[in-house]
Amino acid sequence: MKKYIAFSVVALFLLFAAEGYSQEITKYNFLEIIVVQKANNRGKVKRIKVEEQTSLIGQNISIDEIEDIEETSSLLNYMNAHDWEFLDRQSVVSDDNDPVWMSYIFRKRK
């Protein structure tokens, strides 16, 4: 009987501890990077553009470093090395010969 009561107390404690932990909402910083690529040229990057964003304040990356990157894979590796997680990509193409504008969204846990 004592074992049953002790087990019940421990189980109740673990239940409430797990419930309290699962209620925590993870907060993220989000960063948008615009990549302009040449159309019909195997995705060669023309330019990378980063606007001033509040999520860059206090981070160990800079706009100049990001804008100097010349390949999409290098951009993804750079962001991964600085603990930014790739989240989404949206692209806009207006005409066959116009450049492709792509918006890359990254997030980092606060």
Image (cartoon, rainbow, N blue to C red):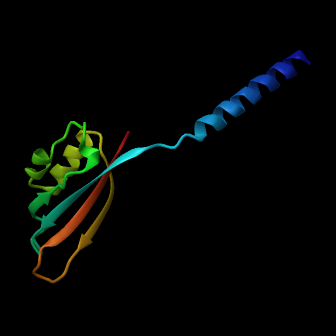
Tell me where residue 40 appears, x and y as whole percent. Answer: 11, 75
In this view, the residue in front, 20 or 69, is 20
Position of 83 relative to 51 (above/below)? above
Residue sticking out furthest to the top: 2
Residue 104 vs residue 2, the one in the foreground = 104
Which residue is drawn at the image coordinates 86% and 22% (left, top)? 4
Image check: 84 left or right of 67? right
Q: Locate the N terminus and report the quarter of the image it occupies.
A: top right
Quadrant in the picture for residue 60: top left
* Count of numbered circles in the view: 0
Does residue 76 sit above or below 91 in this rendering?
above
**Left or right of 45 on screen, residue 6:** right
In the image, residue 53 lies at what x, y percent?
24, 51
Residue 68 in percent (x, y) is at: 7, 50
Residue drawn at the location 19% of the way across and 51% of the way down:
52
Name above or below for residue 52 compared with residue 17.
Answer: below
Q: Can you tell which quarter of the image residue 34 is in?
A: bottom left
Query: Residue 59 sits in which quadrant?
Result: top left
The residue at the point 65 percent across, 30 percent down is 17
Instruction: Specify the farthest residue to the right.
Output: 1
- Image location of residue 82, percent across then percent down: 24, 39
Relative to residue 48, is residue 81 depicted above or below?
above
Question: Which quadrant: the C terminus?
Answer: top left
